[in-house]
């Protein structure tokens, strides 16, 4: 029990450091295919992953080209975080199924298109996005709730009721929309990533659709150290680490302050 407490305390310490260190804690699965093919499996989007548009019912596999274990209905895929190319050039996407035994499962990505997301937006507007840190918005201040958007024009956002006073200093990319609105991207702020609408960070409807009370808005209010919402992810990480014994880097945690 004492050793378990010490291990839990160590992970909690690592999580607490996440407010100042933009690393992702990734606990790798205890999976035979993963372990045997570790060098050929990629994680190009870090802890973010991407979803794909399933145009028809799709088989789910225990391993690429292995046993079919189930099916996914047409719609959006689970969050794909691992990528593997088989010997025939087939593209596979791996995801974690946390609804059962926390299995690593795979679907074929051949012919699938990713759901439009920040990666899609960034590619589409790469010539309009200015890269690099800026001091232009360091003095930006807001007393109330501000919104961190998946990408400019998205209907998904996190409502940050508590946030750093100098949130404007976290910006690493700038974008100006067709209406002249200014947007700033942050790759890490209190466990979050996304775009602030710098013209008015408190505006819940930059393009006219108020999402402040909608289902697509995630509240971000954990208290001063943001530890409440991290307990469940930490316990899950501990359980996964115990099963795999392989701890590689930091898993992105939703630390909302």
Image (cartoon, rainbow, N blue to C red):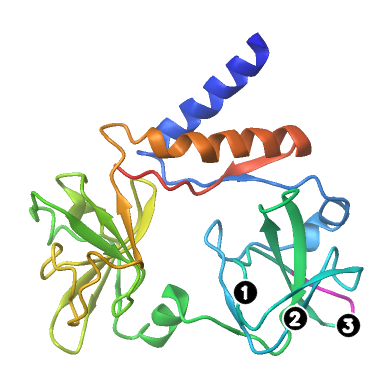
Q: Position of residue 67 (x, y in %)?
A: 92, 68
Position of 179 relative to 139 (above/below) = below
Instruction: Answer with mark 3 or mark 1, whichever residue precedes in sequence.
Output: 1
Going 63% across and 63% down the picture, which residue do you hit?
A: 81
Disc nearest the viewer among 2 and 3: 2
Mark 2–mark 3 distance (CA, rounded to whole Å): 20 Å
Residue 150, quarter of the rendered image: bottom left
Q: Position of residue 227 (x, y in %)?
A: 39, 33
Residue holding disc 3: 88
Is 40 on the left-hand or right-hand side of 166?
A: right
Give residue 77's mark. 1
Question: Image quadrant for the C terminus?
Answer: top left
Residue 38, quarter of the rendered image: bottom right
Give residue 202's mark. none
Asked if the residues shown at circle 2 and circle 1 are in contact, with their CB atoms under 8 angstroms apart, the answer is: yes
Q: Position of residue 5 (x, y in %)?
A: 59, 16
Is 190 on the left-hand or right-hand side of 33?
A: left
Asked if the residues shown at circle 2 and circle 3 are in contact, with their CB atoms under 8 angstroms apart, the answer is: no
Residue holding disc 2: 58
The magenta stretch spans which residues? 84-88
Secondary structure, mark 3, is loop
Decide which of 140, 209 is in the foreground and name it. 209
Instruction: Answer with mark 2 or mark 3, whichever residue precedes in sequence.
Output: 2
Instruction: Answer with mark 2 or mark 1, whichever residue precedes in sequence.
Output: 2
Disc nearest the viewer among 3 and 1: 1
Secondary structure, mark 2, is strand
Q: Position of residue 202 (x, y in %)?
A: 13, 62
Decide which of 255, 136 is in the foreground and name it. 255
Decide which of 100, 153 is in the foreground and name it. 100
């Amino acid at each position: 029990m004492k050793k378990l407490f010490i291990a839990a305390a160590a992970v909690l310490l690592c999580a607490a450091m996440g407010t100042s260190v933009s690393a992702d804690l990734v606990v790798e699965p205890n999976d035979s295919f993963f372990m045997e093919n570790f060098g050929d499996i990629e994680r190009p989007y870090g802890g973010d992953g991407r979803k794909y548009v399933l145009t028809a019912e799709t088989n789910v596999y225990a391993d690429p080209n292995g046993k079919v274990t189930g099916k996914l209905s047409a719609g959006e895929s689970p969050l794909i975080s691992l990528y593997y190319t088989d010997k025939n050039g087939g593209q596979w996407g791996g995801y974690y199924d946390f609804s059962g035994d926390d299995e690593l499962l795979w679907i074929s990505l051949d012919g699938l298109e990713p759901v439009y997301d920040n990666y899609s937006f960034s590619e589409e507007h790469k010539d309009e996005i200015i890269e690099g840190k800026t001091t232009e918005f360091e003095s930006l201040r807001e007393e109330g709730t501000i919104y961190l958007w998946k990408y400019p024009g998205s209907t998904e956002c996190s409502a940050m009721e508590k946030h750093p006073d100098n949130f404007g200093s976290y910006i690493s990319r700038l974008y100006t929309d067709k209406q002249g609105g200014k947007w700033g991207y942050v790759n890490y702020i209190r466990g979050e990533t996304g775009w602030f609408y710098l013209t008015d960070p408190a505006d819940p409807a930059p393009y006219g659709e108020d999402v402040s009370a909608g289902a697509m808005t995630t509240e971000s209010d954990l208290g001063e150290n943001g530890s409440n919402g991290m307990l469940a992810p930490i316990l899950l990480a501990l359980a996964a680490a115990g099963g795999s014994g392989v701890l590689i880097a930091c898993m992105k945690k939703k630390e909302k302050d």
